[in-house]
Amino acid sequence: MCVVLVAFSPDGARLVSCSDDKTVRLWSVQTGAVLKVMEGHHDRVNSVAYSPDGSLIASGSADRTVKMWNAATGLQVDEYTGHSAGFSVSHSRQMVSV
């Protein structure tokens, strides 16, 4: 597994990572333990970002989708499709840019 990108939660307590094994992983910064493994992408996950309030995680993949995950449960809450190439995701207070 090759880690592609990491991002800290707004409160600094958690770290989210994405990798070429098609997963998004949520980690405890304090203990280093994996808290959640989020699966659902069908290709390498290139990008992850937290929402400003820390409640959502967005992930962008080479499978041409953006998935939204509940940061507390690790469950997928939405999916956006239709991209024709790779991309990255980032959150601002107003929107998700892709």
Image (cartoon, rainbow, N blue to C red):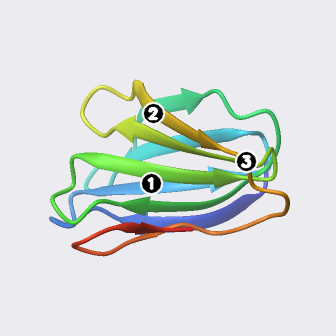
What residue is at 21 percent from the left and 46 percent from the top? 55
Q: Nearer the viewer, mark 3 or mark 2?
A: 3
The quarter of the picture where the C terminus appears is bottom right
Q: Position of residue 37 (x, y in %)?
A: 52, 31
- Seen as rendered, the residue at the extreme front is 82
77, above or below 34, in the image: above
Q: Which residue is mark 2?
A: 78
Percent coordinates x, y for residue 8 in the rendering: 34, 67
Separation of disc 1 and disc 2 at Cα? 18 Å
Q: Total of numbered circles in the picture? A: 3
Is residue 56 shown left or right of residue 37?
left
**In the figure, residue 94 lies in which quadrant?**
bottom left
| Front residue of this view, candidates 53 and 98 | 98
- Secondary structure of the residue carrying tag 3 is loop
Name the residue tied to disc 3: 82
Q: Residue at x 63, y 69 (%)?
A: 88
User: Does dot 1 land on a helix, a strand or a loop?
Assistant: strand
Type of the residue with mark 1: Val
- Mark 3 is surrounded, within 10 Å at the Cα level, by few (under 14), some (14 to 19) or many (20 or more) other residues, namely few
* Residue with the mark numbered 1: 16
